[in-house]
Amino acid sequence: MYGFLLDEFNSDWKQGLRYDSDLGKLLQDAAGISELRPFEDLDLEIYGYTEITDFETVWVDNYVRLLQEADEVFSGTVLRIASDSDFKIQSKAL
């Protein structure tokens, strides 16, 4: 996404790119943003923060519950059938 946005700003961002390059800083410079607001000052509600958080919390709770139920089902005794002979499938010709 950073690369796409940098391309949209017609930034020459690939020149001098290294493994430790800060793409966020490159994007900030390309967009002409001189100062970032602290995270605490952002109004997250305009992005639906509460609704998203509530939905994700319910999703995670259900996921954890399903994992616990699966653990209860599959952590118990395992049924094994011992046999002295091979099991063979016999088909009848019609």
Image (cartoon, rainbow, N blue to C red):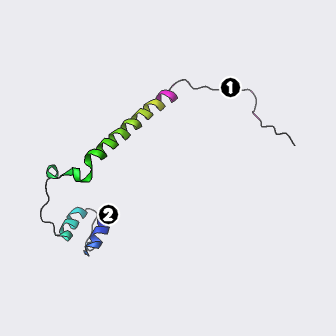
Q: Which is nearer the eye, 19 or 45?
A: 45
Q: Which residue is mark 1?
A: 82
Amino acid under disc 2: Met
Percent coordinates x, y for residue 16 in the rendering: 25, 72
As helix, strand or loop, the secondary structure at mark 1 comes to loop
Dot 1 alpha-carbon crowd within 10 angstroms: few under 14, some 14 to 19, many 20 or more:
few
Dot 2 alpha-carbon crowd within 10 angstroms: few under 14, some 14 to 19, many 20 or more:
few
Q: Is residue 35 visible?
A: yes
Amino acid under disc 1: Ala
Q: Residue at x 74, y 26 (%)?
A: 84
* Image position of 60 with respect to 42: above or below: above
The span picked out in magenta is: 71-94
49 vs 77, left or right, is left
* Image position of 77 with respect to 64: above or below: above
43 vs 17, left or right, is left
Residue furthest to the right:
94
Q: How many marks?
A: 2
Q: Is residue 21 visible?
A: no
Q: Which residue is mark 2?
A: 1
Find out whether residue 61 is within the magenta segment. no
Q: Which is nearer the eye, 72 or 50?
A: 50
